[in-house]
Each structure stands twice: as structure tokens, then as C-alpha cells.
Image (cartoon, rainbow, N blue to C red):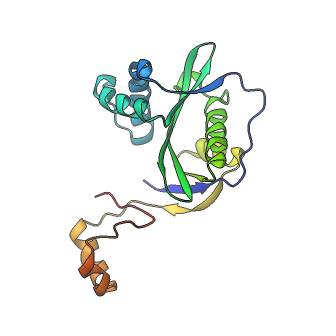
């Protein structure tokens, strides 16, 4: 999956969007599981049973980093602050069910998350699938700036380690594969 990385130095809150943001709680687990299943289908093309997402929903709801956009007491969108480093915070799992899209809910939610992170003196960042031009445009409208493209690598771990060892033999003897680096490779 080819993705664009983004960062946001100044967020632009969309105007006139109905609703408010609130943290997800344990009472939201069933709904969060449904939203995570929808996210899996939209983002990865993998249909999963919402029941299989209960454990992830419980965990996410208990961190204090998962947020919902609420309209008339109904959650309509989710987004998560996945990781905080000393300078940045990564937003992920931005999802709105198809019947509720094009109303600005996810835009409003992500803009509010950016405000929270800016108050923590952190730079919000996220990744967006390049095959989804609508989400990329939404992030740009909120104030995110493109930082570079990221793509999957077809290499196996040992191939990456061999290449890395040839590139930097001294460090490779000390570490297995870029621990603590700015980015992660999941194989």
C-alpha cells in the first residue's frame, strides 16, 4: 500500500460542523468494534466480523487516546492518537461509516485532535492511502502538509537485514533492524 505521510503545524477547523468530540469509554466498545471492522474493510480490503474487534476496541477505548465525534448523542466518527514521541503524535484509525460521510465529521474530529496535540506541544502527523484521494484532500483542507511517500517493501526480513548489514556493518552488529528509528518496518 502506497501512503503519503503528513504533518500539521497549524490546523484549520472546519466551520459549521454539527457535533462535539469526546473520548471513547468502555461503554462504546461494541460501536468501536463495528467502526474498526468498517475501517479494516475500507483501509485494507479485509472484511472482518465486528466481534473479532472487541478486544482491540476494549484496549483502544481504555487508553484515553480514542476519540468519537458525537452528533445528537450518536457517535458518527472515530480517530485515535496512536503514538506520542517527544516531538510528534501520530493519528490513525480515522473512520466514518459510509452513510455518514461527506458531512465533515472526521475533518472536525481530526482538527480537534490536532488542537489537543498542539496544546501538548506535539506536531500531529498521520499517513493516508494514496488510493484514497478524498481522505488525502480532507487532511490537506485541515492544514496537513505532505511530508513524503511511504510504500510497502516486498523484501523479507533477512533480505533487509543483509542489505542493512552491507550498508552499515558496525551498527548492524549492535542491532537487529533499526530499533528506535524514526520509522518502522512490519514484515
Q: Residue at x 48, y 34 (%)?
A: 64
- Residue 129 visible to the viewer: no
Residue 123 in percent (x, y) is at 61, 54
Instruction: Confirm whether residue 93 shows in the render.
Output: yes
State the image quarter where residue 57 is shown.
top left
Where 71 sits versus 167, above or below? above
User: Residue 177 location, x and y as percent?
Assistant: 30, 70
How many numbered marks have been drawn onto this rendered protein structure?
0
11 sits left or right of 100 in the view:
right
In which quarter of the view is residue 29 placed?
top left
Which residue of the protein is positioned furthest toward the top in this rendering?
72
Residue at the far right: name it.
15
Question: Image quadrant for the C terminus?
Answer: bottom left
Q: Position of 166 compared to 12: left or right? A: left
Residue under the image location 48 percent in, 61 percent down: 150
Where residue 179 sits: x, y (%)? 34, 67
Report the front residue among 12 and 135: 12
Toward which corner of the image does residue 77 lie, by quadrant? top right
Residue beneath the point at 34% across and 31% down: 47
**Residue 104, horizontal then vertical, whole percent:** 67, 30
Amino acid at each position: 500500500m502506497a501512503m503519503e505521510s503528513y504533518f500539521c503545524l497549524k490546523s484549520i477547523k472546519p466551520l459549521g460542523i454539527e457535533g462535539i468530540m469526546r473520548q471513547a469509554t468502555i461503554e462504546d466498545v461494541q460501536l468501536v468494534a463495528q467502526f474498526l471492522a468498517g475501517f479494516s474493510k475500507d483501509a485494507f480490503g479485509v472484511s472482518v466480523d465486528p466481534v473479532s474487534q472487541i478486544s482491540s476496541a476494549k484496549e483502544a477505548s481504555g487508553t484515553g487516546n480514542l476519540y468519537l465525534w458525537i452528533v445528537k448523542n450518536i457517535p458518527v466518527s472515530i480517530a485515535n492518537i496512536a503514538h506520542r514521541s517527544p516531538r510528534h503524535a501520530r493519528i490513525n484509525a480515522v473512520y466514518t461509516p459510509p452513510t455518514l460521510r461527506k458531512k465533515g465529521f472526521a475533518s472536525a474530529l481530526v482538527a480537534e485532535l490536532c488542537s489537543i496535540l498542539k496544546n501538548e506541544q506535539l506536531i500531529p502527523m498521520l499517513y493516508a492511502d494514496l488510493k484514497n484521494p478524498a481522505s488525502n484532500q480532507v487532511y490537506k483542507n485541515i492544514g496537513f502538509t505532505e511530508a513524503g511517500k511511504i510504500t510497502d517493501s516486498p523484501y523479507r526480513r533477512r533480505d533487509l537485514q543483509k542489505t542493512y548489514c552491507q550498508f552499515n556493518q558496525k551498527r548492524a552488529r549492535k542491532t537487529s533492524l533499526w530499533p528506535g528509528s524514526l520509522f518502522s518496518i512490519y514484515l
